[in-house]
Every structure is written in C-alpha cells, then in structure tokens.
C-alpha cells in the first residue's frame, strides 16, 4: 500500500511540474512592448483644432508646432501616438494651455522615463534684408522688420488682407538709425497693400507695450510706381523723430486707411509739388512738405 502511495505521489508531482512548466511566465517582456530609443518613442504629436503636426527634435527632445495667428493657446487638445508599451503624461487627448512650453514625460516598459518639451507658437517671419524680388506676405504670418530694409529692383510687395507687419525697436532702415521702411529708393518698386473693411492690414510696433513714436513709418521714394496702393490699412505708434506715418515723393493711392497713436505733427505728408490722389475713407489729412 505504501509503495502504491509513493508511486501515485510521484505521478502527481511530475504532472504538476509539467503543468507549471507550460504555464505562461507573466514576468516575461511583451515583444511588442520593447524599449525603444528616444527618437522612436513619439510617432507623432498633433494639435486637433486647428490641425497642426509637430516637428520632432529627437536630439534635444523637443516638439514644435505652429498654429494660425489668432489661435487661442489656452485650450488646445492633443493627439499623440507613442511606441507600443510606452505611456505619456499628460495623456493624448488632454486639453492643455500652451501659452508656455509644456513638458511631457514618456515612460518605457522598463519604467525609465524621458521628458519632452512641447512648444506651440503662431507663425512669424523676421525680415532683416532688402527685398529684391516680388513677394507676397500672407495673413497667416506676422512679419517683423528687424534690419535695414529697402524694396527695389522692380519688385512688387503684395500684402494680403489681415496681415500684420511689426517694426522691431531699434531697427535701422537704410541710412537712418531708426525704423523707416523705404520703397523705391534705388529702383522701381510697387506695394499693393489692399485689405478689406473686416480684415485690415496692420503696420505697428513689435514692442510688448508700445507707445507713439516707436517707429517712423513708410517712406515712398522717387522710384515708387504710381499704381502703389494702400487700402484698408491701419498704422499704429509711428512718429519717431517727428516723421509721419506715410511720406511720399510720388502720387500713390491711399484709401480707407487709419493712422492713430502717432507722435509726429502730421500723420501723412507728400513732397511739395506732388499732386496726390485723393482717396476716400481716410481718417487723416495730407500735408505738403
């Protein structure tokens, strides 16, 4: 009887050993959840509305996104794709305030982490060189004048309705030590800045808290073509060195344009002897000088 008991015990032990050997080892890593290099942790990073896809910098662990001007950055929902087995905090779909960079943490299957800095900004273009070929400035960007600028070489500068042009503090334009924007100083040029009543073109200072006299204005020299046009434009904070917002040596078309917060004696002047084109809807008076 004892012998049979030992034999039966051996069979049960062998059976249990075999079953235990066949049991899945829960501690074994999931082949789909392997640890990947930082460059492969985030597949994509998107803003849902307005739609924007981030540029991943795998060296510095940053994500940069550009959204249209006027986008409210305080409540942007995300769409994030990450490697299998990885997690990210804050999670995909979470509404975030992107007025300042947001840090995201990616956790790998081995529990180690990597931080990524996500920055969302509006489109901006710095202009610090002469314009020597025709170009169009579009309303989805803010253009900041940062250097000595002359527009010539038979170029046409077209500015779309709703576009914002800012002038940096301390910028130098051509031969002067302050902000003056020259057109047609050396050769023929034309500007077509035609806004609408609901989407004006704005010329202003780039200062965070600007005041009148922050920049000079626009200077239309003798090579400016007669079909140059400013319509539904808005000038702010001009008058540096007592210069007007608009000075022209040639007759140009200006209509439905406002000049406010200026520190010069006159908002707009034309060279004595020039017969100006009388435009409708302006809030200022031309003076000969």
Image (spheres, rainbow, N blue to C red):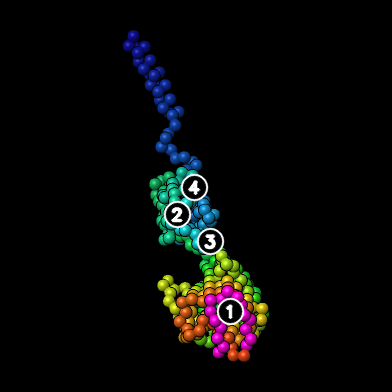
Residue 211: x and y in percent read: 43, 76
Asked if residue 162 is among those painted magenta in the image, a careful observer would answer: no
- Front tag of 1 and 2: 2
- Looking at marks 4 and 2 on the same chain, the residue that comes earlier in the sequence is marked by 2
Disc 2 from disc 3: Cα separation: 14 Å
Q: Nearer the viewer, residue 279 or 234?
A: 279
Residue 4: x and y in percent read: 36, 11
Give the magenta-colored segment's residue range. Answer: 274-289
Judged left or right of residue 191, residue 5 is left
- Front tag of 1 and 4: 1
Do callouts 1 and 2 mark residues in contact (Cβ within 8 Å)? no
* Disc 4: which residue: 83
Secondary element at image label 4? loop
- Front tag of 3 and 4: 3
Do callouts 3 and 4 mark residues in contact (Cβ within 8 Å)? no
- Front tag of 1 and 3: 3
Secondary element at image label 2? loop
Asked if residue 288 is among those painted magenta in the image, a careful observer would answer: yes
């Amino acid at each position: 009887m004892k012998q049979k008991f030992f034999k039966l015990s051996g069979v049960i032990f062998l059976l249990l050993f075999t079953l235990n050997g066949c049991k899945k080892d829960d501690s074994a890593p999931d082949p789909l959840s392997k640890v990947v290099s930082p460059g492969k942790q985030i597949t994509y990073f998107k803003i849902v509305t307005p739609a924007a896809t981030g540029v991943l910098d795998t060296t510095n662990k940053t994500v940069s996104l550009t959204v249209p001007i006027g986008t409210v950055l305080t409540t942007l929902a995300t769409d994030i794709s990450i490697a299998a087995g990885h997690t990210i905090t804050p999670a995909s779909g979470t509404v975030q305030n992107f007025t300042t960079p947001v840090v995201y943490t990616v956790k790998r299957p081995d529990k180690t982490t990597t931080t990524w800095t996500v920055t969302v900004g509006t489109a901006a273009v710095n202009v610090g060189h002469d314009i020597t070929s025709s170009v169009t400035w579009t309303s989805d960007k803010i253009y900041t004048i940062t250097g000595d600028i002359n527009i010539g070489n038979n170029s046409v500068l077209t500015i779309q309705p709703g576009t914002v042009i800012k002038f940096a503090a301390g910028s130098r334009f051509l031969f002067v030590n302050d902000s003056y924007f020259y057109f047609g100083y050396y050769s023929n040029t034309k500007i077509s800045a035609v806004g609408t009543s609901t989407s004006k073109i704005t010329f202003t200072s780039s200062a965070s808290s600007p005041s009148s006299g922050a920049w000079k204005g626009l200077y239309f020299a003798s090579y400016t073509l007669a079909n140059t046009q400013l319509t539904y434009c808005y000038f702010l904070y001009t008058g540096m060195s007592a210069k007007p917002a608009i000075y022209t040596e040639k007759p140009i078309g200006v209509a439905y344009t406002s000049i406010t917060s200026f520190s010069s004696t006159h908002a707009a002047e034309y060279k004595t002897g020039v017969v100006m084109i009388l435009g409708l809807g302006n809030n200022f008076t031309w003076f000969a000088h």
